[in-house]
Image (tube, rainbow, N blue to C red):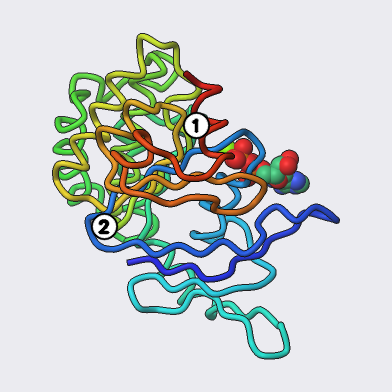
Amino acid sequence: MISAQGIHKRFGSTEVLRGVSLHIDKGDVVAVIGPSGSGKSTFLRCLNRLETIDRGRIDIEGETLVDTDAGGVCRYAADADARRICRKMGMVFQQFNLFPHFTVLQNIIEAPVTVKGLTREAAIPPAEELLRKVGLLHKRDAYPSHLSGGQKQRVAIARALAMEPDIMLFDEPTSALDPELTGEVLRTIRQLAEEHMTMIVVTHEMAFARDVSTRVIFMDGGEIVEERPAAEMFASPAHPRTRAFLNHLA
Ligand code: ADP
Ligand code: MG
């Protein structure tokens, strides 16, 4: 579903990604862990072109989003193609990013109407179905400011799902939430995993990573230091940097 090879990215003189390679198969649930500043968000953002890369190659479901030629020049797919390719991925951010002046329902149907060209009438029933799925149909006409953080994040998940992505990218979806609200969001993500949605989840929730993911990736200093099946990663991390990170959390 996703193949990233040798991704390099710098901001000014700082090399933030130093040759990151990752392969994601259909149904994989990959948890990405690692210290703050290690490049986790930047890597996710590169996958869906929220950031451009400096070197490397990204293929999404067999289509090349970006490649680098022998001369080291990075070439992206033409704009329309790149947009279409990236639409296969839905993304959920730490800060929800809901449209504050739209109701919950309007938030969800916005992209299906403006991007996919559905009529409002056609977009509303599937949007309501998604709201039912995340347990928020009763908030259909509420504005985001009247929702709890956990509810906002569940709306954000429903909104991403409304574009029918094949892959979901989550960037610390519970980090902005009070501890008592993380459970409802993690349950929603867990439910997606049970439905075999392909997902990459950047998270600090180690219990969630261990229980829900198929693989765990530890990033540090712009590199993937270790990549293991979830159970192994937590039982016996191989790399000293992974061990130090996990010990520090414990
Ligand atoms: P993580 O998500 O693992 O905490 P990030 O990918 O957000 O790490 O950041 C990796 C590094 O890149 C950090 O040093 C951060 O300060 C830097 N960085 C991220 N985004 C930008 C940006 N837009 N401009 C400059 N530096 C950035
Ligand atoms: Mg981050």
Q: Quadrant of ligand 1?
A: top right
Residue at the location (27% across, 35% down)? 189
Query: Amino acid under label 1?
Result: Gln
In the rendering, at what x and y percent does residue 44 appear?
51, 51
In the rendering, at what x and y percent does residue 215 appear?
33, 48
Are the residues at dot 2 and dot 1 in contact (C-beta closer than 8 Å)? Answer: no
Distance between the Cα atoms at labels 2 and 1?
28 Å
Residue at the location (46% across, 45% down)? 238
The disc placed on residue 118 is 2
Describe the element under mark 2 as helix, strand or loop: loop
Q: How many numbered discs, if any?
A: 2
Query: Amino acid under label 2?
Result: Leu
Residue furthest out toward the right: 13
Q: Is residue 77 above or below residue 69?
A: above
Q: Which residue is mark 1?
A: 94
In the rendering, at what x and y percent does residue 187 appear?
23, 26
Q: Is residue 238 left or right of residue 89?
A: right
Return the residue nearer the eye: 206 or 183. Answer: 206
Q: Is residue 39 left or right of residue 99?
A: right
Describe the element under mark 1 as helix, strand or loop: loop
Q: Is residue 92 above or below residue 134?
A: below
In the rendering, at what x and y percent does residue 227 appear?
43, 52
Return the residue nearer the eye: 242 or 172. Answer: 242
The disc placed on residue 33 is none
Can you tell me whether the CB of the residue at mark 1 lies under 8 Å from the nearest atom of ligand 2?
yes
Q: Is residue 232 above or below residue 101?
A: below
Bin the neighbour count of mark 2 within 10 Å (Cα to Cα): few under 14, some 14-19, many 20 and up.
some
Q: Is residue 113 above or below residue 156?
A: below
In what quadrant of the picture does the N terminus appear? bottom left
Q: Is residue 226 left or right of residue 37?
A: left
- Earlier-in-chain disc, 2 versus 1: 1
